[in-house]
Amino acid sequence: MTHVICTVDMVLLTLHEGGLKVALLKRDREPFKGVAALPGGFIHIEEDTDVRAAALRVLTEKTGIDVPYLEQLATFSGPARDPRGWSVSIAHYALVSFDVIDRAAHPDVKLLSVDRPISLPFDHRLILETAVSRLRSKSQYSSLPCYLVGETFTLPQLQRVYEILMGELINKVSFRRKIAEMDMLEVIEGQFESAGAHRPAQLYRLKAHFKQQLQLLERGL
Amino acid sequence: MTHVICTVDMVLLTLHEGGLKVALLKRDREPFKGVAALPGGFIHIEEDTDVRAAALRVLTEKTGIDVPYLEQLATFSGPARDPRGWSVSIAHYALVSFDVIDRAAHPDVKLLSVDRPISLPFDHRLILETAVSRLRSKSQYSSLPCYLVGETFTLPQLQRVYEILMGELINKVSFRRKIAEMDMLEVIEGQFESAGAHRPAQLYRLKAHFKQQLQLLERGL
DNA sequence: TGAATAGTGTCTGTAAGACAATATTCC
DNA sequence: GGAATATTGTCTTACAGACACTATTCA
């Protein structure tokens, strides 16, 4: 009897050099051995408590990266997406600041701009596009982009992150009103970031409550 | 070697008697034989082109119901959710008008209010709640509720559907502005629905283009 | 002091909701 | 005509974006 091949794949996204990048990992086995692909692997039923745990385990084992935010994306399936047979992949996406990837310094991990139309094995191009689309959509009305900046950040930095994700400039006053409305940031008293010949910007961090929990807006932006 | 059990489950939702109902099907085999549960089944790799096709096939085979709208919900997984072993279920949800279920008249299909805290086998209670939550959320800013009414309907009827899903009364003028903005309905010339001693309401239907395609609003409501 | 960006105050236009007037039916 | 609901017009209020002013740093 033949059965369904069951895997997890991970779309690890970060911001670098002003654009959204995806972490690709050179595959260490067939099929597509040596080709850069989304990190993925089989579920281990002896150790994984669910597919989320499997996705986290695969990412940590293969890249050494721990992520602050991960959510299930969608399940991709069919007889042709994997040459080994009829398969499902439960895809997840995770957000991380660039320095976490940088510190891991894994030799087989490469960052690639998500806009470059590079070809990927399996249906990883479709999975990637679905993840980017989901991220951009959720950025319109949630605190999701906060997981792409580091532990501490300034409001102008955060605004630029939102602008990159949404692909348009945001009104500064409106942006700050919305951030205040979300009530998810706290001032780091007395800490500022200087970035040139001008007034330094106040440093903020996510309130502890929102490290695992998205904050949503009634109306977007 | 043990492997992952791979299934699909279907949350079929409809409106009846002023409330949101889910279609449950009495199970015809173990485990939980004879118990009402979400319709579900195994993927057939010989005939299913993907999990969506499997979900549609399972629903049609087991209940004889064809649905106008179906989308993937999420994948549920773990060692304990199914007594047969470590399993994943790729859950889908579908919307249909009551008369489609009524016409199918399947003897083992029962409608149950989604708010009643009935116990369900497997993790079907969690799947159901996830589906209802997704539907209510998407109703805020999309044409999704249109799939719960029949082929033709009046604006007051559609507004009541939105109100049931969103759990609050909607301003009539705003609602009509938003419906007009979505530009997804067409007047059925000369056709009205009389419902008592008052002015009859104009009948509308979904434009053909939107029968398969959701329409989204920039700002909700 | 001037350039540059951070941060805030205020005005304006748009869009949502409140209110209400008119339309149409059955009794 | 009266009751009931459909449909549409208009006023008010709330909020998003525009504009601009002040704050603070470095050269």
Image (cartoon, coloured by chain):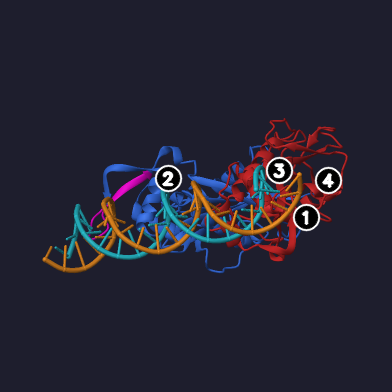
Chain colours: A blue, B red, C orange, D cyan
Gap between marks 4 and 3 measured at Cα: 31 Å
Q: Which residue is mark 3?
A: B88
Q: Which residue is mark 1?
A: B53
Query: Badge 2, how many Cα within 10 Å: few under 14, some, many 20+?
Result: some
Say left or right for B35 vs A211.
right
Residue A220 appears in view = no
Residue at 36% of width from left, 52% of height from top?
A: A176
Gap between marks 1 and 4 measured at Cα: 23 Å
**Measured from the top left, where is residue A2 in percent x and y?**
82, 50
Is residue A201 located in the magenta-colored stretch of the structure?
yes
Numbered disc in front, either 1 or 4: 4
Gap between marks 2 and 1 measured at Cα: 40 Å
- Looking at the rendered structure, the kind of residue marked 4 is Asp
Q: Which residue is mark 4?
A: B102
Check if mark 2 and mark 4 are on a common chain. no
**Measured from the top left, where is residue B158 in percent x and y?**
67, 51
Magenta range: A194-205
Q: Which residue is mark 2?
A: A182
- Which chain is mark 4 on? B
Helix, strand or loop at label 3? It is strand
